[in-house]
Image (tube, rainbow, N blue to C red):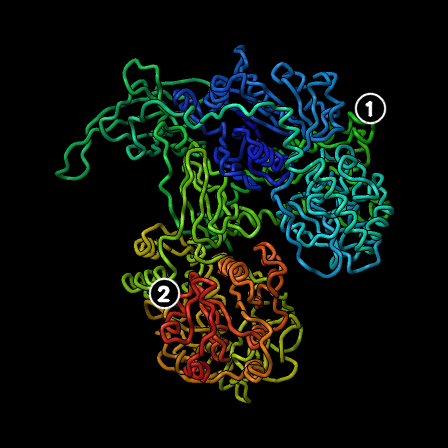
Amino acid sequence: MILICTNELAGPTGYHKSVVQLANGLHESGYPVAVMAFLGGGNVWERMLPSWPLDEAIPAYTVRSLPAEGGALLHRGVYPEYSGNLGALRFSFTANQVAVLRQLNDVLDEDDTIVFTNPAQVLAFQYAIGDAKRRPHTILQIHGDYAHHRELWEPLKSVRGSIDRLQTVADGLRAQFIDLFGESNVVFIPNFPGEGKTTVPRVSHEGVNIVLPASLQHRKNQLDAVRALAKIDDDSVRLNLWGSAHPLNPYVSAVRDEIARLGLNDRVNICGYGSEQDVYSEADIVLMTSLSEGFPYPLLESMSHSLPVVAYDFDFGAREAIEDGRSGFLIPMLDVDLLAQRLGELSADASMRERFGAAGRERYDQHFSQEAVGKRYQEFLGPHGRSIDLTAAFATNGEEPISTEQISHRVKWRGLSRYHQIRVSGDAPLHDVQIDNSERTSTPTVKHRASKRGRGAQAARETLIQFPAFGKDVISYAAAPGSQERHYLGHTTTRHELKVFGHLRRDADYTPVDTLHAAQGGAQHVSWSTTPKAFLSFLDKVAEAVSWKVRQVGTELHKHLQASRTKEQPAQATSFATPAVRTTATPNAPKSSVPAQSPEPEAQAHTTQSDGGLGQGLREFGKALGLSNKLVTSVSSVAKSYAGSGIALLRNAVAVKEPVAPHREIGTHPWFPVTGGTDNFGTPVNTAGAVEVKAGTLTHAPSVLIRGEYDSVRLRDGLSTRTFSSPFTYGEFFDRLCEAEREYGLFDITTRDGDYVWELGRSALVIQLAEALGLWGAADAIGTPVKSAYDGPKRLTTAPHAKTVVFDYVRRGQSGYRTAPFINDDTLFVVQADANGYPGVEDSPLIYPFAEFDQWRRHWRQRWSHLRVPEVDARPFEEALSSALGMNVDLGDHLRNRLAKFQLERDFFTPVFELVKPDEVMIASSHWRAGIVNAAQRSGALVGDIQYALTSRYAPSFWFGGTPHYGASRFHAWSKMWAERTNVYDECVIVPREQSDFEAAKEAVGSAEPRWDVCVISQPRVLRRLLSFVKQIADERPELSIVVAPHPAQRAIIGKEIAAAGLEGRVDIASENTLITVSKSQMSVGTFSTSLWESAALGKPTFVIEVPGYEETLQDVESGLFRLAQSPADLVPFTVPESRHQIFA
């Protein structure tokens, strides 16, 4: 068996990727493989979900949660027994965790191999086994330079006896270790290749895209990439910087400043973290400007995807991967002029890019492919060996005599002293109770007594445990007198709470958690009860961040002082720490390495003036210490970054809740964290476009948070594989929600101030809970950015009198026809911004921009008012929904956020309507503007709703289980058909649509042969299901030509989505609007989109795919207007019935 050890399984760096790909590659080569994580985050289950898919056949565990010796040491699983540090990397292991490593040595033998990937793991293993004989073979995998890093080299020498052989991922690294290990024991084998076995599908695009995939940090040196681009006089050449860009990282700020200074805002994009699909699907050239590396993955990935590479000639990897002038260009270090020249040559010559890419792929197949690397590992590791079930090896003995339900806790005061009082109900077998604070063990006061709860109740036995509340204490006990076997009862915290960790109990099992979470985050309630706690939490985080930065800068200082004394290799003396050390200091923290180059004198002078002298003061202080200008510049930039962001951080800590999207929370096993999974589309979780799975935040009960569009998702842990899906269809979910509204009277529940809060967020909540169930995916607004700034004279607060006020729809660019029939000389129009500003504002005295409200609500008074909006008691609504759905529902901050929005709208527009004095206020989609509705009601105006989309028995904004108090009373519908499909209005007025595009499309029908056989009408929330059906059509009905008509919000991303679905080149993407595309097709396919009814109205045979939400079409499926398409074979043209003429009157 091969046991691969890692600091943590999750992480965005090449180190983390190499561990996952090593496990996958060895498994594919036939080896029995398991993964063991040593370190992690705030709780023992964190950092176990990899960013790259781990094969589901590979079990992965963490030392931090496994029970050793049958559970005999679980009560010693809180305090560390062994701890240390490796540079900036700190590590610690409890007695139970040390025993886990000791037990691993007993379970494995000489036929097994442990692959360590960091010396800290060897240190811990060596400590654990002590003087016992080491049974398995051991290998240490080397990922970077050790020679110039004493914090790595000295520990490596100390564990030489625990390591049989070394394996380096770059050939150039071997020389450092030969003297210590011997030449035959130091072997070079490159990393296994990337996440996909096939080339990433390319997406057509304009111009030339240069990609630099690396986290933004000094060592990756993105500044030179930006400066090189500035020297290329071709605006069609763009640079995409992919990789983590932490907002606290001063280097990120430096890169942004340089982009702006060079006028490259339109040519450089900081993209954030991305998958191979994200990075390479639109890439033309791969660039690496690193100062040092250990054989970076982008070199392998570029070869794999047949892309040319331009890279600095850094140590370790560049020369091994790139054939200069054949598969790419090697540039002398820091030669920005030559770098720009080579990038310009490649950008201007597509044939050269193609030749270089082909040569790179040829080199990849020969030396770096799965097969080539697998063969080298076969020679290195030898026979495949046996498979060992580590799950069974770490099983527990016996049971827990006390259940968690029996345990309760409170804090009592006796005079000026505080005491913990733990009550254990029942006749509990508690003997030899001990309190352990890691320094000493004491005996608490233990009382066994009978208690009565209420008059007439039978006396029940209970045990009271009482001890002083000083800090963190572990409570343990024996289940029988004189027994040496102890059990963990719980432990107290520094905040005097009692925690009972599931992974420290012998009866650990899957946590019974299944909760739907609505959106969280937004403005935080500011009050005496909440703000002090937030402030203390902020101080804790700042202390941690500052101490981390001090350690980081201290490590850099040590390296540079050491380098200043070393004359032999000054360039190498400033190289980086190994990936393991860089990535485990603090999750998501900025990385640091070689300091930035000193700015020019002019830039220094400018900095001195703009930072109030802080930078100059730090430089003088640095000179007094004898530090170099480069190092002082680096340290001062860190200090200024923290000083400049401190106020913003404090504001966010006490006034802003971190946003969390809707999701489903599923309980997991305390000993076996989830390490991967696959959705029903066959896509591994956490990959491009797939279901997102993250570790939960509870410290006492493990869980995962699931988000995305799926029918089912399969999750793998070290014990089992479990499958989850929505317990009901969208139609069943919507019916249950409406029934809860009726049964519990949700529309009539008010806040203390009398606001009917349920309806304020009801429509959005339907969408959010459907997302949480996996029925729908997220539909992020990705459309064209709007130009919302307005400095003209028109103000809503000075608007003239008008008989009618119409609020136009937000996406007016695609839907202006919806409100076109209401334009007249008696109507005041309030318009939203589009890409060109506010349409029509300069053309008509009765068209006013929405801008004043947006400006008003951003004023500090309104922001303060927003913060003072009280918390909403969501419990009545959560209880109603939980009962109706049969699963827990957490509404998060949704209702309070909607209440705050409602109050802002109401407070602003009430005086506006009192001034304008309209008879009717009409709103396109009124249920999303409850505050404006209420302001109109207050002024005595009638409120009308303008139809903006389809109505149906299952439409979130048009069908309710109660009567809204802030709803419109009149509905302006397109036809009688739509008016009859809503249950919320007192009266309906038929206003036929005025849509020139629709009339043009009707005229176009029949004028020429259809260009396509099938038009697929896209819908954002079910795009994956739709594209899955499109792939079925392409596979099973190759004779049909297909065009995809994207939703306006998807046009920017539809190309990548189609490529990811394997449909690149097999379908067309419509360049014209959906109506025109439908008119040029023989038939249409889609789901709950208004365009389906437009297709039928044009006489096109229209088919509905059964995806969540298709229930909105059922009435017209039953009438024969639509037909269901359960498979591609159902796509047979039919005659559309005459009822199509009634759709739009």
Observer-nearest of 334 and 931: 334
Residue at x 81%, y 37% (from the top left corner): 313
Q: As drawn, is 536 to the left or to the right of 984?
A: right
Mark 2 or mark 1: name the one nearer the start of the chain.
1
Q: Residue furthest front?
A: 1039
Give how far apart the Cα atoms at labels 2 and 1 are.
75 Å
Residue at x 66%, y 29% (from the top left corner): 376
Q: Residues within 10 Å of mark 1 (few under 14, many from 20)?
A: few
**Mark 1: which amino acid?**
Thr
On the image, the x and y values in percent for residue 887 come to 34, 50
* Circle on res. 566: 1
Callouts 2 and 1 close, C-beta under 8 Å: no
Q: Residue furthest left?
A: 456
Q: Is residue 532 above or below residue 981?
A: above
**Residue 617 in which image quadrant:** top right
Location of mark 2 (residue): 754
